[in-house]
Amino acid sequence: MDASSSDKNRSPWSRMMIFGVKSFALASVIAALIIGGWFGVTKGRTLWKNTRTANLSDEVEAMIKSEQWDSAVPTLSRAYAEAPRDPKVLRMIARFCDRFPSQSEDATHFWRSLMDSGEATAEDRTYYAAAALRVGDVETAGKMIASLTGADLETRVALETRAGILDREGKGDQAMLLHRRVWAESPDDPECKLRLAEADLKSTFAEMRHSAKLNLLELARAGGKVSGPALLALAVGASLNEAECVEAIALIDTAGTMAERQRYAIIDGCVSQSRSPEVARRVVDAEVARVKSKKPGDGGGA
């Protein structure tokens, strides 16, 4: 793999950190000189907090909601260059890194810096706990959760993190009860519906497994982010009839971008469940035609 393809596989934050460190440092020095020399350190810091950071925070929040990652990076870069210790800036970058599982280490770094600033909120401690758990720091996650009280301990992120800690401590049954509580409290959330259905597929009760299959089919038909995972759960864990197998395979192409290995895992599971040589032949013919029609550089990941 050459350097250019390697760079493309990095998250936006990683690319920004690699290519922009020198410019960030220079911009930080210039910003410090301008703010410190022209306005005075205290007045400059106050001005930044009250105007510039607030504006950038709104911009980044809007970009994150609309998933304009590449647009958010320059804005975050500018903010960090000008005010690398500002709590609002640290919070913005930490929340951005939280969006990329591969950037959990970076997220914990910025959350920790925010904790050190003395201006972290209960919500900040909750997100720090979640990030710490993702990198395996159960001790820090536990300390952050222990610092929460009342309603702050009952938010979705806090509950999911508490469940994750219980899982790491070998208390699987307690963890699943907490997970189910979170999922059941958000029945209209596609991801919660997916997780609950995945859990119900493992139930010893046939009625629960059947209900889970129907919910997964509904999610797969609806498209969106959970369509692919729903199809995979159906392929490897549900009892599908031949018609459902054929439908699930057809839905792959409406499920959005998908890694090739996930695509073929779904196809393999559905063909195996169909137990139909005719279904297998049609699927193989369709996949051969799809591969032949692809242009160089097309296709999903490995």
Image (cartoon, rainbow, N blue to C red):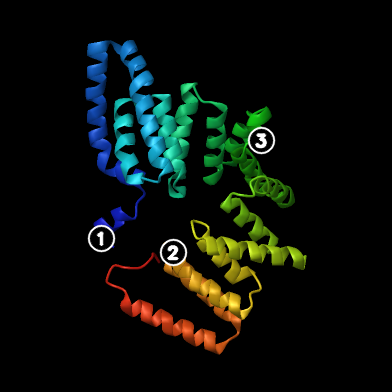
Within 10 angstroms of label 3, few (less than 14), some, or many (20 or more) residues?
Answer: some
Q: Residue flagged by tag 1: what amino acid is it?
A: Asp
Within 10 angstroms of label 2, few (less than 14), some, or many (20 or more) residues?
Answer: some
Which quarter of the rendering shows the N terminus? bottom left
For image coordinates 49% across by 87% down, the residue present is 281
Disc 3 or 1, which lies upstream in sequence? 1
Quarter of the rendering containing residue 275: bottom right
Nearer to us of marks 1 and 2 is 2
Labels 3 and 1 touching (C-beta < 8 A): no
* 3D distance between C-alphas at marks 3 and 1: 47 Å
Q: Is 22 or 300 nearer to us in this picture? A: 300
Q: SS class of the residue under badge 2?
A: loop
The percent coordinates of residue 59 (x first, y second) are 36, 34
Residue of label 3: 154
* 3D distance between C-alphas at marks 1 and 2: 23 Å
For image coordinates 62% across by 36% down, the residue present is 155
Residue of label 2: 258
Q: Is residue 106 visible?
A: no
Disc 1 or 2, which lies upstream in sequence? 1
Q: Is 253 or 158 nearer to us in this picture? A: 253
The percent coordinates of residue 252 (x first, y second) are 48, 69
Q: SS class of the residue under badge 1?
A: loop
Relative to 274, residue 120 above or below: above
Disc 2 or 3, which lies upstream in sequence? 3
